[in-house]
Image (cartoon, rainbow, N blue to C red):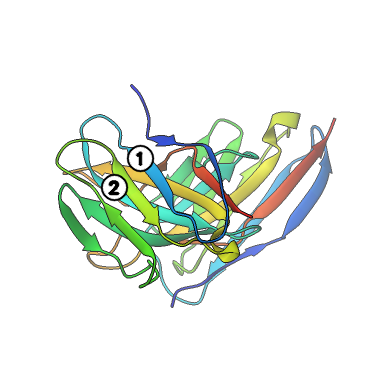
């Protein structure tokens, strides 16, 4: 029973470059959630996706950030023209279609460092 | 928006001691979650509480859902070195937004062997 898989675990980018973070949900899960954790902070909600649909992106910055969860393949969180303030840990969680009771199970995260 | 206040911010204890930490909110939550995060890892769910007044145990961990639904505490008994980490409380959003967890800032626990 594989958990939520995220890659890369660590990513270094220079200012202005693009960052792509990938998340494969747990087997049988069709809902994906992205959270961001700044240093010494708790996690903050960014976006909720189902296959081929963005359900709620209210926590995601309007510019430079985008997310997708295609019919096939992992969910992708894309950050264009990264700035130093984007340096953070990005966590993905997933849940099943039915029976969700408010608990989220997170992956190990992708740590982005912007130089 | 909803905010969760955790205390203490950090704790330094000796191995074998018991630990208590709590979480308060200005608004009501219908579920309380406690997570532990090891350095460089993702948060791992420890305990989920669904009912006001509920007391739930998971090994040496015990958590309670406050009667007012605005607070929760987590106790760790007979601490061991691997209990080191950051403990977060979290509560889901209301209505159809229960996937939007609000996290506290965490309690950093250090256990001296």
Q: Residue shown at 56%/55% (left/top)?
A: A88
Q: Nearer the viewer's eye, disc 2 or disc 1?
A: 1
The answer for how far apart the CA atoms under marks 2 and 1 are is 8 Å
Instruction: Report if the CB atoms under discs 2 and 1 are less than 8 Å apart.
Output: yes
The residue nearer to you, when weighing A96 against A76, is A76
Crowding near pointer 1: few (<14 within 10 Å), some, many (20+)? many
Picture coordinates of residue B24 (x, y %)? 56, 68
Q: Which is nearer the N-term, disc 2 or disc 1?
A: 1
- x 37%, y 35%: residue: A4
Which x, y percent locates residue B48? 42, 46
- For label 2, the residue is A32
Identify the image quadrant of the C terminus of chain B. Answer: top right
Residue B13 visible in the displayed image: yes
Q: Residue furthest top?
A: A1
Q: Is residue B92 visible?
A: no
| Depth check, front residue: B85 or A51 | A51
- Considering depth in this image, is B70 or A56 the residue closer to the camera? A56
Note whether A95 is above or below B15 in the view shown.
Answer: below
Q: Position of residue A74 (x, y in %)?
A: 28, 38
């Amino acid at each position: 029973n594989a958990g939520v898989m995220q890659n890369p675990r660590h990513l270094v980018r220079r200012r202005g470059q693009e960052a792509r973070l990938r998340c494969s949900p747990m087997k049988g899960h069709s809902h994906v959630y992205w959270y961001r954790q700044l240093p010494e902070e708790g996690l903050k909600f960014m976006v909720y996706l189902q296959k081929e649909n963005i359900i709620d992106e209210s926590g995601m910055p309007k510019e430079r950030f985008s997310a997708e969860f295609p019919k096939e393949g992992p969910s992708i969180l894309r950050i264009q023209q990264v700035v130093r303030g984007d340096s953070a840990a990005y966590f993905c969680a997933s849940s099943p279609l039915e029976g969700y009771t408010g608990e989220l199970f997170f992956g190990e995260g992708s740590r982005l460092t912007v130089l | 928006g909803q905010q969760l206040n955790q205390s203490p911010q950090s704790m330094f204890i000796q191995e074998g001691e018991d630990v208590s930490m709590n979480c308060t909110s200005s608004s009501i939550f219908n579920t309380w979650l406690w997570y532990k995060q090891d350095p460089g890892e993702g948060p791992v769910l420890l305990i989920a509480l669904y009912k006001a007044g509920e007391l739930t145990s998971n090994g040496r961990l015990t958590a309670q859902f406050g009667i007012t639904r605005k607070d929760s505490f987590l106790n760790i008994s007979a601490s061991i070195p691997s209990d080191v980490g950051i403990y977060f409380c979290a509560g889901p959003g209301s209505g159809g937004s229960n996937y939007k967890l609000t996290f506290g800032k965490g309690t950093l626990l250090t256990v001296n062997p």
